[in-house]
Amino acid sequence: MRSHPPALVTLARRTIVDEALFGRGARVLAAVSGGPDSMALLHVLAHLRRAIGHELVAHGVDHGLRAEAGAELDRAEALARDLEIPFGRTRTRVAPGGNLQARARAARLVALRAEAARVGASCIATAHHADDRAETVLLRLLRGASPQGLAVLPPRRGDLVRPFLRARRRDILAHLERHRVAFSLDPSNQDPRFLRVRVRSELLPLLESLSAGIVGHLNALADELGARSGQAGDPLEQAFLPPLPRATRLALAALASTRSTTARVRLPHGLVARFEPSTPKSR
């Protein structure tokens, strides 16, 4: 008799426990965008609060690149409200130009780190999954990365944790359908002008037609190379993510001590972020 594969909640719980991502009493900031992966992350981490004992807050970042982004974050906020999770958002501006996706990711992580510092979260949970990791390995191979550069997206690196790393994209979509969780789709994720989109839609399916287990193989490779290098850090990621300067940390501490529901804080890379935290709710 054929058994069903583990549900997304089970996969996430195993990863959280086995990789010691966080435990009882930890405050976790979930990065949300309104897309399928992050909406599933928010739903699953809320479901696991009783079993693991963590506190959960959610935060979204609007880069100012698409008019639809605000409505997508509204959808994420509505789910957070239903789950009784505090939700906030940051509005930033990323100038048009080359390497847009990478610069947007950098701005997003800077803003998320600033919010984590403001609310006292010990880690930031992102919705990266096994398919994302396989795509990233292939992207690095195409760009001629070193073995250390292929040790991408580990379950934990510093303050970033990835509870979905042992799950596939299909596990996430099945969870959303099973629990009737609504989500938004970002059209840039289907734009073939971006190399990652072509890797996702063309290269990875071709490789899977040649080897059905290629996603698992690429993830195992990243694990092994990370273990060999001690996962000292991804130099490309670190280049975008310097520690918050002292002035920013002090500004965030001052903001946290106020009763204001909106504030503006200057972040690295010339960003000025406007924070819009929600009032926490008891659960």
Image: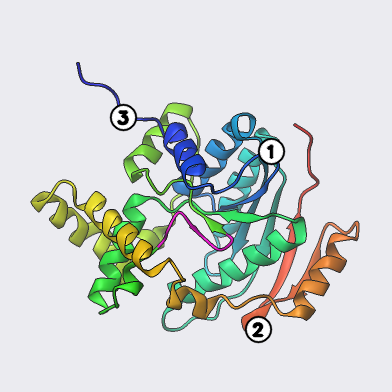
Residue 152 position in % (x across, y down):
38, 65
Q: Is residue 20 above or below residue 14?
A: below
Assign the C terminus to one quadrant of the image. top right
Residue 175 position in % (x across, y down):
42, 33
Q: Is residue 154 magenta?
A: yes
Residue at x 38%, y 69% (from the top left corner): 229
Q: Is residue 102 magenta?
A: no
Task: Give the structural element (helix, strand or loop) at label 2.
Answer: helix
Q: CA distance from mark 2 to mark 1?
A: 32 Å
Report if residue 106 is visible in the image.
yes
Pointer 2: residues within 10 angstroms few (<14), some, or many (20+)?
A: few
Looking at numbered disc 2 in the image, what kind of residue is underneath it? Gly
Q: Nearer the viewer, residue 231 or 128?
A: 231
Residue at x 61%, y 61% (from the top left corner): 61
* Residue that sits furthest to the top in the current view: 1
Task: Give the structural element (helix, strand or loop) at label 3.
Answer: loop
Q: CA distance from mark 2 to mark 3?
A: 46 Å
Pointer 3: residues within 10 angstroms few (<14), some, or many (20+)?
A: few
**Residue located beneath label 2 in the image:** 270
Circle count: 3
Looking at numbered disc 1 in the image, what kind of residue is underneath it? Arg
**Residue located beneath label 3 in the image:** 5
Looking at numbered disc 3 in the image, what kind of residue is underneath it? Pro
Residue at x 79%, y 34% (from the top left corner): 282
Q: Is residue 163 above or below residue 113?
A: above
Residue 174 position in % (x across, y down):
37, 33
Q: Nearer the viewer, residue 172 or 274?
A: 172
**Residue located beneath label 1 in the image:** 81
Magenta range is 153-159
